[in-house]
Image: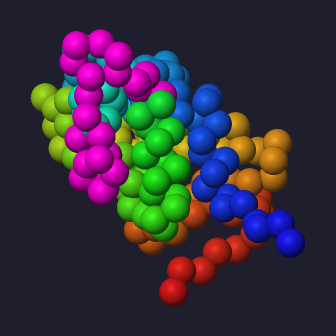
Amino acid sequence: MQQERDPFELLRERSIIAILNGDTDFGEIQPVDASSNIKVSMPYLSGPVLCDISNRFGLPAEYGWSGGGRSRWEYLDNLLKFCIEQDRISDLLGFLFSKGQFVEKLKGHTPEVIESSYSKIVDTILGQINGCLYFGGHELTKVADRFVIKKIGSAVTIA
């Protein structure tokens, strides 16, 4: 009997990892109060930052400063796989999408601009991830404070 694959495995697709690690951007927002635009992307996750996040979630990782280190894609893929196996993937996504991760991108603006820009960025990124998942009939959604991958059009309840 074949074991059913965890739907979160879909997030390990290379194009989705490129979104999550900050490699892919989706244009810019021009806030009303700002002299500069804000790039619509996830915060850039460097190798050392990815190692810090991995260690935070219980996956030992060390950055190879003198060469021979893994690619950023590989660090994040290993972390996604680990969190899926540990049933902590929603926690990881919650951390990656938390407002605190966007401080560098949004600092220096009014609270109103921070809130509206943060919401626009997260909505755009989730939309782009869902564009990758669409042809397989799935979508990533946030219900209360949990992330879930569900069949498009199906209802989700969180206990």
* Position of 154 relative to 103 (above/below): below
Q: Main secondary structure of the magenta part?
A: loop
Viewed as shown, does residue 63 lie left or right of 123? left
- Quadrant of the frame with the N terminus: bottom right
Out of 123 and 139, give the one closest to the viewer: 139
Residue drawn at 35 percent across, 16 percent down:
68
Q: Does any portion of residue 40 appear in the rendered image? A: no
Q: Is residue 17 left or right of residue 43?
A: right
Q: Which residue is drawn at 76% across and 67% down?
A: 3
Magenta stretch in the rendered image: 52-73
Q: Nearer the viewer, residue 55 or 8?
A: 55
Provide residue 156's location: percent of width, then percent of height. 64, 75
Q: Where is residue 117 in the image (x, y as percent from the top left)?
A: 35, 37
**Residue 131 picture location, percent across and down:** 70, 38
Q: In the image, 40: left or right of 16?
A: left
Residue 121 lies in what quarter of the image? top left
In terms of image quadrants, where is residue 39? top left
Asked if residue 57 lies in the magenta stretch, the reply is: yes
Q: Position of residue 141 (x, y in %)?
A: 58, 58
Quadrant in which residue 44 is drawn: top left
Magenta stretch: residue 128 in it?
Answer: no
Outermost bottom residue: 159
* Above or below for 107 versus 58: above
- Can residue 66 be seen here? yes
Task: Establish if 143 lies above or below 68.
Answer: below
Name the residue at the left extreme: 108
Of residues 112 and 155, which is closer to you in this image?
155
User: Which residue appears at 68% of the width and 53% of the height?
Assistant: 139
- Residue at horizontal 63 percent and vertical 51 percent from the top: 9
Report the residue that reaches farthest toward the right.
1
- Quick check: 94 left or right of 125? left
